[in-house]
Image (cartoon, rainbow, N blue to C red):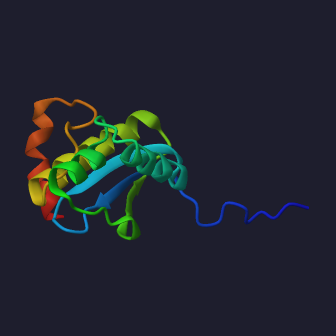
């Protein structure tokens, strides 16, 4: 019988934060995949010098190092549209706080939501 603990410790359907080891910037992402697989994809993009990858661009522009050991899972959400919207809010929140590597804000939302970001930052 196969162990039911096969995926212990693995997470998916989440919004995550990857910090820089050398400055206050972070990368906010979302994935429906197992996070360890998504992390491998990010690392492959860095190795391949993928200009579309924000983590690679940050390393190239600054010479900084990514703190893979300090990754945080900041929210869980199974519903794709909701997960993408939450990611967008977290990008805005961290951009206003310490800054983000993300080049754009994820899911586009109405500007009326911008009044909520300062309130969320206080919570």
Looking at the image, which is closer to me, 65 or 34? 65
Q: Residue at x 73, y 62 (%)?
A: 6
Residue 99 location (% of width, % of height): 13, 55
- Count the marks: how many? 0
Apparent side of residue 40 relative to residue 90 in the rendered image (left or right) = right
Residue 101 location (% of width, % of height): 21, 49
Q: Residue at x 31, y 62 (%)?
A: 66
Q: Is residue 101 visible?
A: no
The quarter of the image holding the N terminus is bottom right
Residue 74 location (% of width, % of height): 36, 59
The quarter of the image holding the C terminus is bottom left
Q: Residue at x 47, y 45 (%)?
A: 41
Q: Is residue 123 above or below residue 41?
A: below
Q: Is residue 29 above or below residue 67?
A: above
Apparent side of residue 34 relative to residue 26 in the rendered image (left or right) = right
Looking at the image, which is closer to me, 15 or 66? 66
Q: Is residue 107 visible?
A: yes
Quadrant hosting residue 115: top left
Residue 24 location (% of width, % of height): 16, 64
Q: Residue at x 37, y 55 (%)?
A: 16
Looking at this view, name the residue that lies furthest to the right.
1
């Amino acid at each position: 019988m196969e162990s039911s603990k096969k995926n212990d410790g693995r997470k998916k359907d989440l919004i995550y934060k990857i910090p820089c080891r050398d400055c206050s910037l972070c990368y906010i992402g979302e994935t429906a995949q197992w996070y360890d697989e998504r992390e491998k994809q990010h690392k492959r993009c860095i190795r391949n010098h993928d200009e579309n990858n924000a983590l690679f661009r940050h390393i190239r522009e600054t010479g900084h190092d990514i703190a893979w050991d300090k990754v945080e899972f900041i929210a869980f959400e199974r519903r794709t549209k909701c997960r993408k919207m939450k990611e967008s809010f977290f990008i805005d929140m961290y951009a206003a706080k310490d800054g983000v590597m993300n080049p754009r804000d994820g899911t586009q939302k109405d500007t009326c939501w911008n009044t909520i970001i300062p309130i969320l930052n206080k919570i």
